[in-house]
Amino acid sequence: MKIIVNGAELELDVATLAAALEALDYGDAVVATALNGHFVAARARAEAQLAEGDRIEIVAPRQGG
Amino acid sequence: MELYGVEVASRLLLGTAQYPSPAILADAVRAANVDIVTVSLRRESGRLREGQDFWSLIRNLGIRVLPNTAGCHSVGEAVTTAHMAREIFATSWIKLEVIGEADTLQPNVFGLTEAARILSDEGFAVFPYTTEDLVVAERLIEAGCKVLMPWGAPIGSGKGLNNPFGLRALRAHFPDIPLIVDAGIGLPSHAVGAMELGYDAVLLNTAVAKAGDPVAMARAFAGAVEAGRAAYLAGPMESRDMAAPSTPVLGKPVLAR
């Protein structure tokens, strides 16, 4: 199904946010996630079900002022 | 200086963006001897993982981070960013920015107060990037903010203190709230000015990062903040419009021919 990950439309055959992160090779990277604009805690990713057209944001620490 | 119950020695807070290299960023942070640096959250690619090295560098500095919500234009975006920051940085501190205008990057103070209330109620220690407006400041304190961060001038402009009168009034109205001038500082003299007004600290980024020698400039700002604070505590003289001779008039010999 089509999922929008960090603004890019991807074809992903996964059911949950945790599975999406695994499929996208995040491994043990330090990231935080949001699904359709709402924060999803790391511990809740395995229960976060994905549906066609969902928007995922995956972020990491970066330089800031 | 105490910020949300945490005793902080350095009155200079430094941003981590726009340095020529990660090594120069680290050297500048050490040279400035700061206790707090600001950081952000940006999209991460599973393949490139650009944020991981940066995070490792910051962690190795062993200092406190103040994550921001830079670039957020709505309450919802800012709140979600704060939630993500709290998990990833393991801190409830958040530099809350809700931007209202693209050219000046000035805060949307209506969204800011709303987001500040939501986040304060959720237990965040909110550092709101605001203007020098007294009414907005009052609202932010009512919302739960225990620190205020008024701008000196638009972010990245290097213009210094655009409204010293407004900043002085804010200081006078809120003598017990830690006030940090955030944004617009371009020169150490601007930082001195903020501290001489009685501000508790200064937060800056571009002025150091974009200097010809960021490490030397970081050192210069550290000295400036200390000098300004010392001057404030020493009680600056009142300025006046007319001259007043400093050398005694009494006892001057009459030498006119």
Image: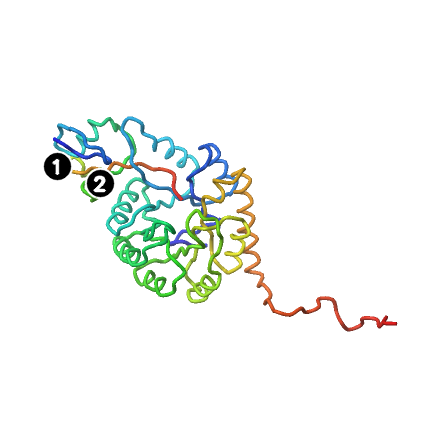
Where is residue B90? Give x, y as percent. 31, 42
Where is residue B11? Give x, y as percent. 48, 51
Between the residue at mark 2 and the residue at mark 1, the CA separation in whole angstroms equals 12 Å
**Which residue occupies the foreground of this view, B213 or B162?**
B162
Chain designation of label 2? A
Q: Residue flagged by tag 2: what amino acid is it?
A: Ala
Query: Which structural element holds mark 1?
Result: loop
Query: Which structural element holds mark 2?
Result: strand
Where is residue B183? Give x, y as percent. 43, 50
Residue A49 image label: 1
Residue occupying image coordinates x 30% and y 43%: B85
Q: Residues within 10 Å of mark 1 (few under 14, many from 20)?
A: some
Instruction: Write down the quadrant of residue B48 in the picture.
Output: top left
What residue sits right under mark 2 in the picture?
Answer: A34
Q: Residue flagged by tag 1: what amino acid is it?
A: Gln
Is B211 positioned to the left or the right of B68 in the image? right
Residue B36 image label: none
**Which residue occupies the foreground of this view, B88 or A56?**
A56
Is B44 positioned to the left or the right of B6 in the image? left
Is B222 positioned to the left or the right of B124 in the image? right
Residue occupying image coordinates x 47% and y 40%: B209
